[in-house]
Amino acid sequence: MANTDLEVIIRIGSHSEKEYVEKTGHRFDGLMIGANLVEVTPGASASLLVRMAGQRKQRPYYFDPMTYAFGSYVDPISGLLRTDLDWIKSEQRVKGGKKGQVERLFKNSYAKLATALGEPFASSISNGGRAVTPDDLGTKAKRRATAASVIAYQRDRIRSVFREDEDYKEYADEVPEPAAIFAPYFYIEPSDEERWITVNLELAQAAAALKEPVELHTVICAPMETVSDRKFTDRIQAEVPASGVQGVWLWFSRFDEHAATAEELTNLRRLVSSLAGSGLKVYNLHGGYYSLALSKFGMTGVAHGVGYGEQKDVVPIIGQSTPTVRYYAPTLHARFGVPDIERSFSSLGISTPDDFWNTICDCAVCKGILQKGLDRFEEFGEKHYSTPQSKRMAQTPAAAKLCRFHFLLSRIRERDDLSKTSIAEVNEQLKLARRAWRGTVLRDDLLYIDRWLAALR
Amino acid sequence: MALTKEADLLGPISAYTRRQGYTRQSAEVQFYDYRIDLYGFSKPTGRTIAIELKLHKWQRAIEQALVYQLCADFVFIAMPASSIARVDLEAVARHGIGLIAVGTNRCRLEVAARQSEEIREHYKRYYVELLKRCSAWQIQT
């Protein structure tokens, strides 16, 4: 069941990430784009996808229909169930209103997406917003219609962008199909878990019944606690393979591989193993190295952002400041602050650039930066006052870019290495890395390696 | 005055280190994503100090102090005198970190800091230049 053709799929979060995709995307196994991004920037999204998926680069692409955005959710601040879809709204200027007058409206991207997807999504954003419920999908006919429209959207949306453009309409039929299409999916909200699982499975069945000529996948999107809920995982293991899909993408909201307990990690491994054993392709929608290592237990692929997006909340907490993009330590498969890495140099015996390249990383980015001297490592963490009003310095865009490119190159290497190594060798490498870094300031931050080792045994 | 908050330690420790010659000082100095509670510069000697204030969590203070050794000649942990008994003095000394006990009326050096062997001159230079531009010490006591 071990997978030697592990796929790493890069998720495009915004068009500001275009440079990363254009420069490294061809070395990954696919690209994924969210439908909300396509709706707000159809031309740019379509041309990027066609550039990457077209005849020259031929990267498979996936089109996440983002249907979960229209379901109920648990507010991450209050912990309360919300059905008003407020998280996909924003403060917007009142047209024709007084200066500074704002009102809370649906974000343009999601409003357009709901309209494009049809019912029940379109109705959910009328009258101020009401989340789609299992009752809205309570009949076979409704589920079939919803599955058909969501699938048609994924198969045709990019083509339609070309079709609507006078200069490019003749190329519309050359737009490649997505590598797989997703059945509509919703967050399995814990207060109504059973019904949400049922609806998701029924939507997968309805999509499978359409017998589209493209591979069909479903997404299991649930709170991270469910990975350790035996009843939940038993049902997923038993019923997803029977739904008629060829692949399943797991998304346990807020599941952080570096913070998860050994038990949670083991349960994820078991789930992956069981689903793969049923003949399904299994992906982690937002995963990191641990998920990559699960290729030894049947994981087909892992998706993540360019820097880094290895875990994701179903509902993001708004108002958080932009996090620093930290340096990815390849042998530790984790990211750390620049000064923490730098302070580890002496304990690791690093006193020259050559030492660094031999011990930490010799990717093209690290080679380029450190050939000017070991002290140039600080460029990965360079800070500035981003505005004259800033009270605190933030990472410069140039430093963030270095960290992201270094991460992407490291990830390619991790994938390639995994395809050549056994699970015993993976575990041995993890042990060696932990031992090597044991004497550094990071020693107390490496406990996740023990948990990974316990789970990968 | 009871020392119940980390901020309560700042005034006494600032006065103490000024008496040691570190007359140019700044509090809450950013070092990447860290905030150094007190950074000081002695113009006559050209030396710098970084001080981490903690009420109890001395292990965490050691972790932070080790990182500050990249940018300061001498690094100290300062804690209320009443908390010092719980600190592993050997661990502090082994890392070359100093320890200062802060009382309501006076501060006392418990462990002397060693000159940092980890210091990066470019980091130190940045903070020295920053403090040289200050006309006077910046701590509000």
Image: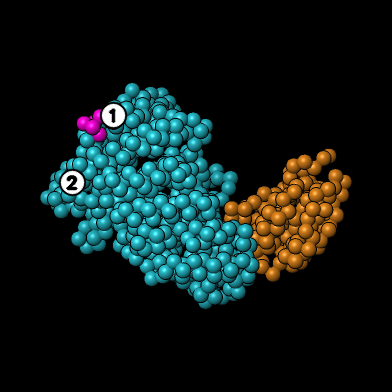
Q: Earlier in the sequence, mark 2 or mark 1?
A: 1
Residue A250 is situated, as x and y percent measured from the top left of the image, at: 38, 48
Q: Judge left or right: residue B42 versus residue A34.
A: right
Viewer-closest of A60 and A447: A447
- The reply to whether the magenta stretch includes residue A449 is no
Q: Is residue A370 visible?
A: no
> Which chain corresponds to the colour cyan?
A
The residue tagged with tag 1: helix, strand or loop? loop
Q: Is residue A400 visible?
A: yes
Q: In this picture, is A107 found above or below A425?
A: above
Q: In this picture, is A371 found above or below A114?
A: below
Residue at mark 1:
A138
Residue range in magenta is A136-143
Give the numbered dot on residue B17.
none
Residue at the extreme left of the image, as rendered: A170
> Which chain corresponds to the colour orange?
B
Q: Which residue type does callout 2 highlight?
A: Glu
Viewer-closest of A78 and A211: A211
The colour style of the image is: by chain
Q: Main secondary structure of the magenta part?
A: helix
Residue at mark 2:
A212
Q: Quadrant of residue A294?
A: bottom left
Marks 2, 1: nearer the viewer: 1
